[in-house]
Amino acid sequence: MIIRALLVLALFLGSASPGFAETITLGAENDWAPYANPDGTGMANDIVSAACKAVGIDVVFNVGPYNRLLKEVREGAILGAFNVPKESANEKDYIFGSTPLFVAHSAYYQNKDHPLSAGKKEDLVNGEKIGIVFDYGYGDFFAENDRIVKIPVRSDLLNLRKLARGRIDATILYDKTADKLLAENGLNGKILKAFDSESLDIFVAFSKTFPKAEYYAKKLDEGLAIIKSNGTYARIMGDH
């Protein structure tokens, strides 16, 4: 009788376990619309959720400031956070999967009334004041350019306001963010794209000390492959 009961229990557990999703928590930045919004929605959030779900993992988002979340990842306080560009400067700090969430394209934006004299990013060599966001990645070329003045603030919108008032010479924006912020703030006629900056692969950055982080990075890669093959990824990109 006991043996029979154990066999029934084993069969139940074996059949039930696939239906129970594992749950993880990831940091989601709160100020990179439309990639990641203050309410925990956004293109990147949708991609991460769908990829995790495809491999039986539910994800809860801990929404907060980008620089604080990355600090928590480095300290091992949270499993991982997004949206992090993989650059030579940060590869030693995090575990990255093999597949980016998406590729983000950026450009320099200028004030129409005070345009840059430079015609491309390589011409920025005269101490131009460039507005950036604390701890954001802008690519290896930008990181290595020591002939400009990099002025960090808390958000892209603050940089746009400073640029509109002539307090900086230019700012770097990613394309979807630029389209949204310029339209919402009535700046399309005043702030113009100057020239392209860099295109970056955007990842979830996993902690080097949090338990099973490498495992979850690989599971996310698996999930991304699945949603790219079944059309989910293309639908998400189209929605945003």
Image (cartoon, helix red, strand yellow):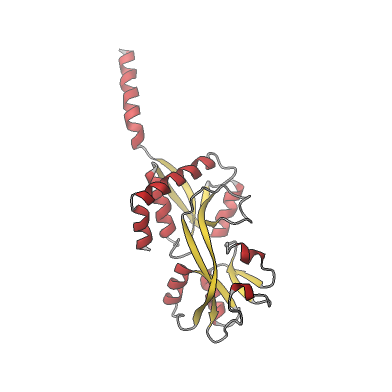
Image quadrant where one finds the C terminus: bottom left
Task: Mark yes or no: residue 108 visible.
Answer: no
Residue 71 image position (x, y, % from top left):
60, 53
Residue 3 image position (x, y, % from top left):
33, 14
Instruction: Identify the residue at image location x=36%, y=32%.
Output: 17
Position of 223 compared to 96: left or right?
left
Task: Mark yes or no: residue 172 visible.
Answer: yes
Q: Within the image, what quadrant is residue 22 found in? A: top left
Residue 141 image position (x, y, % from top left):
62, 65
Residue 118 image position (x, y, % from top left):
61, 79
Q: Residue furthest bottom?
A: 113
Q: Within the image, what quadrant is residue 120 found in? A: bottom right
Instruction: Identify the residue at image location x=35%, y=28%.
Output: 14
Compared with residue 224, is residue 136 higher up or lower down, i.e. above or below?
A: below
Task: State how many labels appear.
Answer: 0
Compared with residue 15, is residue 4 higher up or lower down, i.e. above or below?
A: above
Instruction: Identify the residue at image location x=46%, y=83%.
Output: 189
Image quadrant where one finds the N terminus: top left
Position of 160 compared to 183: left or right?
right
**Residue 21 or residue 173, whichever sits in front:** 173
